[in-house]
Amino acid sequence: MQIYSAARLEKDYSAVAAQCARTGEAQILAENGRADLVVMDAKTYQRLAEKATGTGLASDRIALEMGVVAAG
């Protein structure tokens, strides 16, 4: 896990996103020297959410909440 400044994320989003996807690890974003947010790639998040709920339904719920799929 690495710590990035919010300014670095703004400048180099692609590199931070690629690191998340490549390592499968969350990255900490700091604002004014303090940890502010944790980011990870969506695939890793879905895997962790499904593991936590014990079902395969988490990815559908995440997609619905993000507006990726229409409510059925």
Image (cartoon, grey):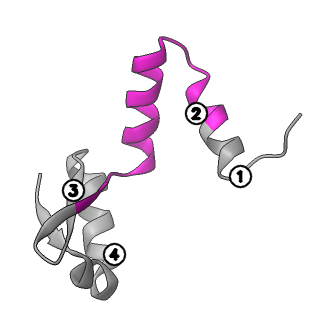
Q: Which of the pair 30/69 is nearer the observer?
A: 30
State the residue position of label 3.
Answer: 27
Q: Is residue 70 left or right of residue 39?
A: right
Q: Is mark 4 on a helix, strand or loop?
A: helix
The reply to whether dot 4 and dot 3 touch (C-beta < 8 Å) is no
State the residue position of label 2.
Answer: 59
Residue 12 at what x, y percent from top left? Answer: 28, 82
Looking at the rendered image, the disc whose residue lies closer to the viewer, 1 or 3, is 3
Query: On the image, which quarter does residue 27 sit in?
Result: bottom left
Which residue does the image show at 77% across and 46% down from the upper left?
69
Q: Which residue range is magenta in the image?
A: 36-61
Residue 39 at what x, y percent from top left? Answer: 32, 55
Residue 13 at what x, y percent from top left? Answer: 33, 77
Dot 1, how many residues are within 10 Å of its Cα: few (below 14), some (14-19), or many (20+)?
A: few
Instruction: State whether residue 44 is above or below residue 4.
Output: above
State the residue position of label 4.
Answer: 14
Which residue does the image show at 33% across and 65% down from the upper left?
17
Q: Quadrant of the C terminus?
A: top right
N-terminal of the two: label 1 or label 3?
3
Checking the image for residue 68, the label placed there is 1
N-terminal of the two: label 1 or label 2?
2
Dot 2, how many residues are within 10 Å of its Cα: few (below 14), some (14-19), or many (20+)?
A: some
